[in-house]
Image (cartoon, coloured by chain):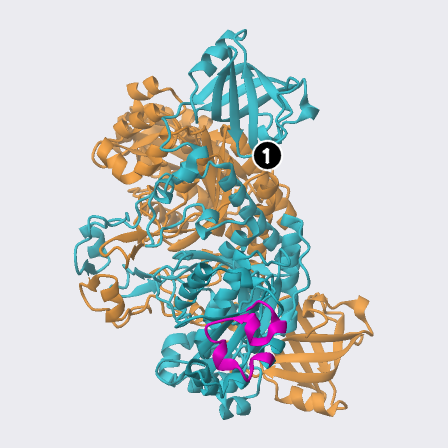
Chain colours: A orange, B cyan
Amino acid sequence: MRSHYCGQLNESLVDQQVTLCGWVHRRRDHGGVIFLDLRDRDGIAQVVVDPDTAQAFATADRARNEYVLRIQGRVRLRPEGTENPNMPTGMIEVLAKDVEVLNSAATPPFQLDEHGKVGEEVRLKHRYIDLRRPEMIEKLRLRSRISHQVRAFLEKEGFLDIETPILTRATPEGARDYLVPSRTYPGSFFALPQSPQLFKQLLMVSGFDRYYQIAKCFRDEDLRADRQPEFTQIDIEASFIDEDAIMGITEAMIRNLFQDVLDINLPEFPRMPYAEAMSRFGSDKPDLRIPLELTDIDDLMKDVDFKVFSGPANAEDGRVAALKVPGGAKLSRKEIDEYTKFVGIYGARGLAWIKVNERAKGLEGLQSPIVKFMEGVIEELLDRVEAKDGDIIFFGADKTRIVDEALGALRVKLGADLDLYTQAWAPLWVVDFPMFEPDDKGGLTPLHHPFTAPSCDIDTLKADPAKALSRAYDMVLNGTELGGGSIRIHDQAMQREVFEVLGIGEAEAQEKFGFLLDALKFGAPPHGGLAFGLDRLVMLMTGANTIREVIAFPKTQSAACLMTDAPGEASAEQLKELNIRLRQKAKPEAGGE
Amino acid sequence: MRSHYCGQLNESLVDQQVTLCGWVHRRRDHGGVIFLDLRDRDGIAQVVVDPDTAQAFATADRARNEYVLRIQGRVRLRPEGTENPNMPTGMIEVLAKDVEVLNSAATPPFQLDEHGKVGEEVRLKHRYIDLRRPEMIEKLRLRSRISHQVRAFLEKEGFLDIETPILTRATPEGARDYLVPSRTYPGSFFALPQSPQLFKQLLMVSGFDRYYQIAKCFRDEDLRADRQPEFTQIDIEASFIDEDAIMGITEAMIRNLFQDVLDINLPEFPRMPYAEAMSRFGSDKPDLRIPLELTDIDDLMKDVDFKVFSGPANAEDGRVAALKVPGGAKLSRKEIDEYTKFVGIYGARGLAWIKVNERAKGLEGLQSPIVKFMEGVIEELLDRVEAKDGDIIFFGADKTRIVDEALGALRVKLGADLDLYTQAWAPLWVVDFPMFEPDDKGGLTPLHHPFTAPSCDIDTLKADPAKALSRAYDMVLNGTELGGGSIRIHDQAMQREVFEVLGIGEAEAQEKFGFLLDALKFGAPPHGGLAFGLDRLVMLMTGANTIREVIAFPKTQSAACLMTDAPGEASAEQLKELNIRLRQKAKPEAGGE
């Protein structure tokens, strides 16, 4: 029905007849002539309808915004002085010979160019309108391209695309499952997978050697700022490989992707042990675009006459750290108060600081509420953080976890607020994670999942499990975890030992992952893998502000779809067939917000 | 960890050192030497371990079937006379220098080469073992390749891969939905999609122009022979196209696929109206490899003195048809009895027949229990079906639906039993479907779905809806429906008229598909699409016997996964969070069969 997409028109087509199909993006009458901006997924073209072509003119005259038209006409250069260099098609226009209305359109609930003034709820309710915005089309088009490039790369590397079930059994990620009542087994439930983890390991046991899947995963969690109940994972697993091999392949995949899709040559990915990342950046996903670092000063603060500092400095699980911000002395009292409030979110009970106005003047040159307690150590402190005139030094002193989180977050916020970025893209691998972390009950819980292999042997693990490191790795880009994975345990004795450390009895292990444990008995190869969050990757690559901008039909924070009104009511008959009843009736506002 | 896959070894590598990783497929001792067949996903290589290499020999000596080994050695030609031309690697072997056990294996529940003797239940329970069979690996590898080629083709044609939600609202396909209780909206439920139908139409309204997705779909039906509760669809939709365009693109896609993956050049796809398919083959998915056809003989049978024939011949909804089988006179009485039983499955109350032993002899030359009733019309009948000596003619006389189904199925069965196939692949398009079919209550129900566009205008539709044809099309290959679709209604007045014909009131339409109807108001383009059943396509292309052979982790007929034991029990706490309780307790056998 068309000869070209609107966005494809350019000077090379001048004097050619073209047929376009699309939507009226804007219509104006000017000097007795009608100008239509016709929009399709590739762009916008200006169509001129002259009263000379009477029928075309009459049709164009009744066209309104978002009408669907088919236009036949001739491409010509725009008259001198009327070119629009901001539009890819801005040098030309189409003189219409024929205008056909393919469909009319009621006045949309909001105009595309006014979306900024319209609340997200209205836009989600009429998602099909909001998706018409060229930015939205562009983001989803890029998403399609990213998926395609990822597949092409993995295909070339010999990975097989294998689908795993959606109706399955609870998986070991530990988040809350979505359940699906079974009709054929009354009282039983499927779980939607939190990841294909167990299945991909089974595929390795079967000998598929290299597996990938762009897989839907599900978690019924209370949604934090930017999560979705269903999300998409680039899921990868391979056999007879070690961490260098799998990190090498997936790093190449991401580098290729950035090259192909964004024409960006990512720098090499440094590898950083978890302990170093926490110590220097207070985060296991440090944003290395920001040239700020945490500096340990426990040793200096052990004996100061300031309990807020000396307490954590002497406590085994405490930390005192400094964060120097070059040029930060210009921050106002109000700004510092804001940052103090900000670190409070992470549990910090205050935010001590020193402004270095003129180091040469000694204490006189410093401005700070707390410097008086530090007289004996101040010079060593300033030397250690390499303080210069005009800097500010922030302090964190608390339990290590709180200091890391508060100063880590502050570092990222300062980087953004003060625009300290030294580079556009800063990728890295974080490695050498601990196998376990303490849980609430004084026991240990896996930092990843219980199939992650330790980097030590079984005796070392047994001797001091809390110190054991794992063969896990996370890929981090600009402070976002793009993906993570590990070499898995393929040895039964090791798997038993890990379960023992975790206090998982044989019966519980059998109940939860029996089929995987069985499978490991029958000749499991050494294997490992990785999963990338596709939504987050696309978000980073498109510069989107929320994950909802890169998902065609996203859900709200309360896991509802405002467009389809899902979830909705089920009939009594349906519930009976599924052998369930409601504890309380559906609330009338269900499905909305 | 390896230099080559086992299956990659050949004469070109003779005298080279190689490293292989894989499973012990078979082990034999022969003349003091150990022979190991080492298996990986690419094939099997013979490894020879000589007692001279003492350590390798000792290791190989304790290796059992399905042990995971790493072998280093030198490729050499097999001694003359011991080559195995049936194996791709049968000309060479690897003389091991080093043998390393990467993992041991308990004796598997069944040996791979004995799978034929093992029930499917056992194999499904230990699916990770069954998947080790080279045939299974090959089928899933081909599936991966098929998905990849489909994507590559559609990508090249400008289709965008867009993901649609899994947690959504009931869709209009009309089968039973899988429901997912919502925790955040107590008493409300998501439905898993039976297809992305509504979403893909919305994407057209948004202007994405060309969409595709390899999408998981779900139907909670009592599973017939070869269905799965979750299945995979190649889902396609495009705007500003007509049926010729979309049929052209998708036909090219399938032809390319067969060419690329199987090196098969499919013939051109003829187009056959639905009415013709039913009349000539008794089926809307005729297997054109079989050169048998139904012949209408109502006119001849109107006045015969045999009510079984004259009744249906005179009834408005009746049909009398003949099916001539060349050379079929050799069928035994017992075989004919079997076929009579067979058509009984489809509701036929008998199977009349005439054997044409010697046409020249007139009635004498015919053998039949019914020919006596046909004296006056027999010559015209024999002429019409072009009967020759040695043929058999079967008859169907009943309601049209029963005759079509019974003789249609008999035709296919005879084709297989007597191996009548004239070609390996016989594709076609079936077109011109009726818009509606009668439902149980004397009304009309859509043959496809209520968004399918009619091929007539609104007034003609209104005048005689039962006669209206649709703009739907099915692609059929070897008697299997590979896919189907239609041009959709994009005009609101037409959509309202179709709902009226279907007796769907405005309130009901709004409740069920309100968001789609809303969307159609705001400038919907002309659009249409198609969906292919990927599982079935792969089944045909791999020559698999059941759909379960081309799905990595399939479910049983009662929708259970024997390996993971899904569905399983949910805890009281989980149910409470989801605001549901059980009507009756889970049965202990849940999850098994």
Mark 1 is surrounded, within 10 Å at the Cα level, by few (under 14), some (14 to 19) or many (20 or more) other residues, namely few
Residue placed under numbered mark 1 in the picture: A268
Residue nearer the viewer, A558 or B166: B166
Q: Is residue B247 left or right of residue B305?
A: right
Q: Is residue A77 left or right of residue B294?
A: right
Residue A236 visible from this viewpoint: yes
Determine which quarter of the picture holds residue A564.
bottom left
- Residue B39, horizontal then vertical, whole percent: 52, 29
Residue A420 visible from this viewpoint: no
Determine which quarter of the picture holds residue A48.
bottom right
- Residue B197, horizontal then vertical, whole percent: 48, 68
Q: Which amino acid type is shown beneath numbered disc 1?
A: Glu
Location of the C terminus of chain A by quadrant is: bottom left
- Residue A457, horizontal then vertical, whole percent: 37, 19
Residue nearer the viewer, B35 or B531: B35
- Residue B236, horizontal then vertical, whole percent: 56, 64
Does residue B357 belong to the magenta stretch?
A: yes
How many labels were placed on the picture?
1
B410 in relation to B418, above or below: below
Does residue A454 belong to the magenta stretch?
A: no
Location of the N terminus of chain A by quadrant is: bottom right
Which type of secondary structure does the marked residue at label 1 adopt?
loop
A51 in relation to A81, above or below: below
Q: Magenta segment range?
A: B356-379
Instruction: Tell me the subunit letter for badge 1.
Output: A
Q: Is residue A218 left or right of residue A502?
A: right
Residue nearer the viewer, A381 or B22: B22
Residue nearer the viewer, B487 or A405: B487
Identified at 64% across, 80% down, the residue is A69
Identified at 68% across, 20% down, the residue is B14
